[in-house]
Amino acid sequence: MAIHKVSGIETEYGVHTAGPDANPVSASSLLVNAYAAAVDRRTRWDFEDETPDKDARGYAREGALPPAVETHLANTVLTNGARYYVDHAHPEYSTPECFDPLELVCHDKAGEEVLRRSMLAAASVPNAPAVVVYKNNSDGKGNSYGCHENYLMDRAVPFTNVVAGVTPHFVTRQIYTGAGKVGTETSAFGSQSVPYQISQRAEFFEELVGLETTLKRPIVNTRDEPHADPKRFRRLHVIVGDANLAEVATFLKVGTTALVLAMIEDDQFPTKQLTLADPVRAMHQVSADVDLSTPLRRAEGSTITALEVQWEIFAAARRYAKEKGLDAVGGEQVGEMLLERWEAVLTGLESDPSSLTGQIDWLAKRSLIEAYRERHGCSWDDHRLAALDLQYHDLRPERSLFKRLPMERLVDDESVAAAVTQPPRRTRAWFRGRCLAQWPDAVVTANWDSLVFDVGGDPLRRVPMMDPLKGTADHTASLFESCDSPSELLERLSS
């Protein structure tokens, strides 16, 4: 039976700062450090278990380069269980582990709020440059940065099965997860004119399977870093997604993928009939196909559109839900909500895409841009359209075009505000976050699967958290209520 799909999102935000000495690394560090100082967060990240060079295939392709682990850059852990740090030249917010896709939408939105507060905190630093943050995926100059998803999986499932199952979904889910983009930045389309794309990230992918995340990007990433018991669990590190502002798009991105992975684990995914002849080319074709009509070549020779692929996956998911249930994606209530939303969006894309402009980023943005083009008679290569594109992703409320739109909400502002400081109750993030909130001076370092305590005269104590579904509020809330000190907590845990 499929294991529960605990999930999270890591978002690298775009930054801009003016001036001749503008430096994105310095700007990113300013944001993280200013926020950490404002909320009095000093807990450092523990890099001891970081192994980005491990490959799920058991080997790395010759010439493959694992991501660098930059231990010298700003890096902190927050009371909601999240990690906030500088990754290369970007501030990155990694949500805490979430129990279901709706909870993850809330914590993804909390990440946006952390970045907004970071801009305000940075603005109060004397002589600091003004820094603007964007939740997007490329700088318009050929450089892309990621929004990565992570899903808990059963280690026993062969990785070849994972690749075969997720590929058609990753290639085609962009029809509702894409963030939209004016023009192109790579040679992916050759001489083809592509004025507007569904996805910001799709054109940057060059391989089907691989370890890299910044060069020769693969559709299926093979990083084998479970952040949990490696004998039981795998963490599927997904790098193909766009950074979404629309809550419905995020919910579908995470929820449909979690359900697909559960189907793969239970060997109920329709792999053979959906296998594509050239997934990388299909990835680019789908992004350029705003009419959702381009035929994609299947391995057996026939063709199928991205929308048809998604309908096939949805039908299989409905059968799976009936036979196996929806516990793996958070239970019947969230699971049924997911299936209903998935079906409604596919129906809307098929019959009237304009009906989804309040739910899907690429359609919302395109509607804005088309209205501007009509008013001003712009061609698609007009630089003002690229500026509008960027302004859609601006996190400053007074400047954001997204904020001006009547987009559908799935979580309310009160829940998002709470998620800025409070961890999810049904994963190990609860224990991490409560320790940091209750005894911040005693926690020396933290990472996803352990905390290191300094309680005075004793040696440093590491508390392992190797199961993402242990250390929940149900498991540990009474401990925090009954223990007066971190020493007492550690004693109770050891007994």
Image (cartoon, rainbow, N blue to C red):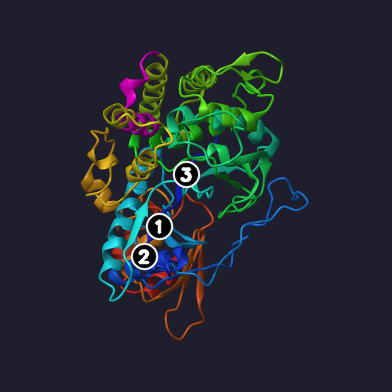
Looking at the picture, how far across and down is residue 10, in whole percent? Answer: 46, 51
Q: Is residue 26 left or right of residue 302?
A: left
Residue visible at 34% across and 37% down?
246
Question: What kind of element bears circle 1?
Answer: strand
Disc 2 and disc 1 in contact, CB within 8 angstroms: yes
Q: In the displayed image of the protein, which residue is found farthest to the bottom?
A: 457
Q: Which residue is mark 1?
A: 15
Q: Nearer the viewer, residue 249 or 396?
A: 396
The answer to whether any part of residue 436 appears in the image is: yes
Whichever of labels 3 and 2 marks the residue nearer the N terminus, that label is 3
Type of amino acid under label 2: Leu
Q: Nearer the viewer, mark 3 or mark 2?
A: 2
Whichever of labels 1 and 3 marks the residue nearer the N terminus, that label is 3
Looking at the picture, how far across and down is residue 280, in whole percent? Answer: 64, 33
Q: Which residue is mark 2?
A: 31
Task: State which region is magenta.
Answer: 351-369
Q: Which residue is mark 3?
A: 6
